Amino acid sequence: MGMKQIIESWRGFAGATTKLYHYSELDDNSSVLDPQHFLTHRNPYTRRDYATSGFPRIFFYTDLDNVEEQIASGRNLYYAEVPTQQIYDIIADPDNLKDMSKGPYGLSLIFDKLFQNIVDQGYKGAYYNIGNDAGVVVWFEPISVTKMEVA
């Protein structure tokens, strides 16, 4: 079952949570990540994503079996658990926010506008796929994370 189906299945359960994974050079047992910090402290891999949108956000993986090696290498693994209902599924786009976020003539998606529309609808994060179909969630607010021990 893919992340999309998991999110759709979980949306019906008010208490459901989703575990998100973040790689960082931090070495604390826990920390609070702030999207504003990442506007000026980007690694080379997220710079490409920020070329698409400068909207402040923190990147999380949803599946440890589908992680980009260049991101994980030499970094510590952190996790956060968030209410699933706070994550907007961009792929399914149930509120048609992509249509509301297109540029002139409806030809291209403006990601800054899409992320703002998602936040305006009350969501704190958004789910989508990158490159090799790795599921990611971008989070738009400060979030507490806890270090994981990797076996």
Image (cartoon, rainbow, N blue to C red):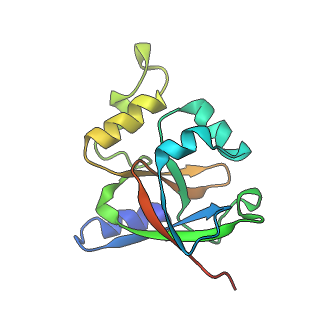
Please tell me whether residue 33 is drawn above or below residue 19 in the rendered image: above
Residue 96 visible to an observer of this rendering: no
Residue that extends furthest to the front in the rendered view of this protein: 28
Please tell me whether residue 41 is drawn above or below residue 69 in the rendered image: above
Label tally: 0
Q: Residue at image x 25%, y 42%?
A: 121
Please tell me whether residue 82 is drawn above or below residue 111 in the rendered image: below
Expressed as whole percent of the image width and height from the top left, the position of residue 55 reads 47, 35
Q: Quadrant of residue 95?
A: top left
Residue that extends furthest to the top in the rendered view of this protein: 105
* 103 with respect to 117 (left or right): right
- Residue placed most toward the observer, 34 or 54: 34
- Residue placed most toward the observer, 139 or 39: 39
Q: In which quarter of the image is residue 42?
A: top right
Residue that extends furthest to the bottom in the rendered view of this protein: 151
Expressed as whole percent of the image width and height from the top left, the position of residue 142 reads 41, 54
Q: Residue at image x 56%, y 75%?
A: 29
* 37 with respect to 9 (left or right): right
- Residue placed most toward the observer, 147 or 104: 147
Residue 100 visible to an observer of this rendering: yes
* 117 with respect to 49 (left or right): left
Expressed as whole percent of the image width and height from the top left, the position of residue 86 reads 31, 57
Q: Residue at image x 40%, y 38%?
A: 115
Expressed as whole percent of the image width and height from the top left, the position of residue 111 reads 47, 32
Please tell me whether residue 103 is drawn above or below residue 46 in the rendered image: above
**Quadrant occupied by the C terminus:** bottom right
Q: Residue at image x 35%, y 51%?
A: 124
- Residue placed most toward the observer, 20 or 146: 146
* 59 with respect to 98 (left or right): right
